[in-house]
Amino acid sequence: MILNLIIQILLCICLIASIIMFMPGCILLDIRPKIYPAQLPRSLDQFDRFEDLKINEFTKINLNDNNTVPESIAIYQGHLVTGSADSTLYLIKQTDNSVETLVKIIDDKTKTQNGHQQPIILGLQFDSKGVLFAVVLNYGIYKVEGIFSKTKMNVKVSEVLSVEQTQTSTGVFSKFLDDIAIEERSNGEHILYITDLSTRYDFNQIALSLLSVDYSGRLLRYDMAENRLDILANNLLCPNGIVLLPDKTALLFSDFSKSVNKYWLKGSNAGKLEKIITNLPAELDNIRPSINGKTYWLAMSNPRTMKKPSEFDYFLKKPWLRTLILRTLHLIGMLFDIVKQIIPSNDFIDKMANDLKTVQGIHSLSELHISDGGMMIEFDSDGKIYQSIYTHNEELKLMSEIREISSKQSDQRILYIGSWKLPYIRKLVFSNKKSQKTF
């Protein structure tokens, strides 16, 4: 009797799971997770430990409010500028690490017109004349002229490319513009190169994008003079940080496959996309040039190995499990939507429905990729790694970008470190020595 009951319960569970797994995407969450392509290294022995550095200074530069998320840092003639989660720009003074508020890119009127979507500043880049270009999440790309003017009236903010302008003839448009690189033509015109992290999931659905192994990302080129948008590459796995080589022959960009990619713009390889670094042991973010102009810094989060993988890695190996969990959560969220129709104006029910469908409210899933560790590497345009620094402690956690400035001492490196989650910038000054590691 008991055995029959257990068998019946198991059959019911299997039936429900089968329905959830195979229900059409037009009814339930349309998601078919892919197999994750990257592998972790067996050890981190080939990388240098943060704890072994000779550190001369490590400072946290707190910004003006906790709403600040200094994802990116732009440099112009010694001026360091970063952004925030409400589109405010800040100046960081090198002399005393003080912070000055500059300008807000998205005003209240524009925010209201866009349904009060959060205008987080992501990629930041100056051109040679001090015009700042900014990727503003949910809004598009903006430029700020006269940003260092003492008179606020002289500061001009204008839209360069809206999210709506990224739409193709098939109706596909960007859900998550991420980073930007600038090419200046001899006539003063600008070409913008943009990583489009996803055309399927927006910022609030980032957990869905990562857990589904979303290949809807694109590499875009926008000609400002001709108002023309070109898709250089598509079907990319969450492309992220991007940089243009000094000779303008190619672009480097990171992606979620723990790889650094090279897209050729000129020469016999024009249009070719190749991976120059693969299977790095962490989640990759922005790429920025070092002070020598020949190498690049790459910021990464959560360094780990095959021997000590994270829960995130476990889920990435099980596409069927991800499908079952994500669709089940979405189904429960739909049930909350039904309840919301019966009990209107209930903020709790509304939040639960949204959190379940986007996985935001499921902490163990939405923040699987977050840890206290961090890692950075210095590499060249051919993929050769010259230096690496990692730690499992909090000093380098949640890094998004590394900006280097010149030092008066030849054996010293000065780095400013941004974050996609923490409300402060870190300044790291360390004695430079040639790595003894072999990469």
Image: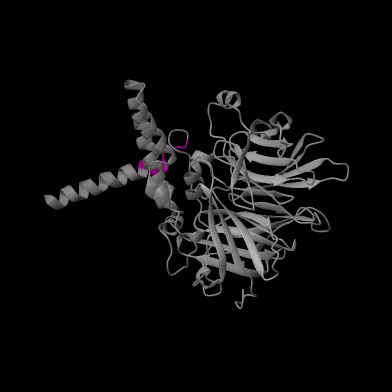
At 78% across and 52% down in the image, what residue appears? 265
Q: Residue furthest bottom?
A: 436
Q: Is residue 330 visible?
A: yes
Choose between 68 and 295: the one closer to the eye.
68
- Across and down, in percent, residue 353 comes to 38, 33
Q: Residue furthest right?
A: 187
Choose between 93 and 291: the one closer to the eye.
93
* Residue 106: in magenta span: no
- Across and down, in percent, residue 347 comes to 37, 27
Q: Quadrant of the C terminus?
A: bottom right
- Across and down, in percent, residue 388 comes to 59, 68
Choose between 45 and 307: the one closer to the eye.
45
Q: Residue furthest left?
A: 1
At 54% across and 62% down in the image, what residue appears? 375
Q: Which residues are magenta?
A: 19-25
Which of the 4 image quarters holds residue 378?
Answer: bottom right
Which of the 4 image quarters holds residue 330?
Answer: top left
Task: Judge whether 310 appears above or below 18 on screen.
Answer: below
* Residue 23: in magenta span: yes
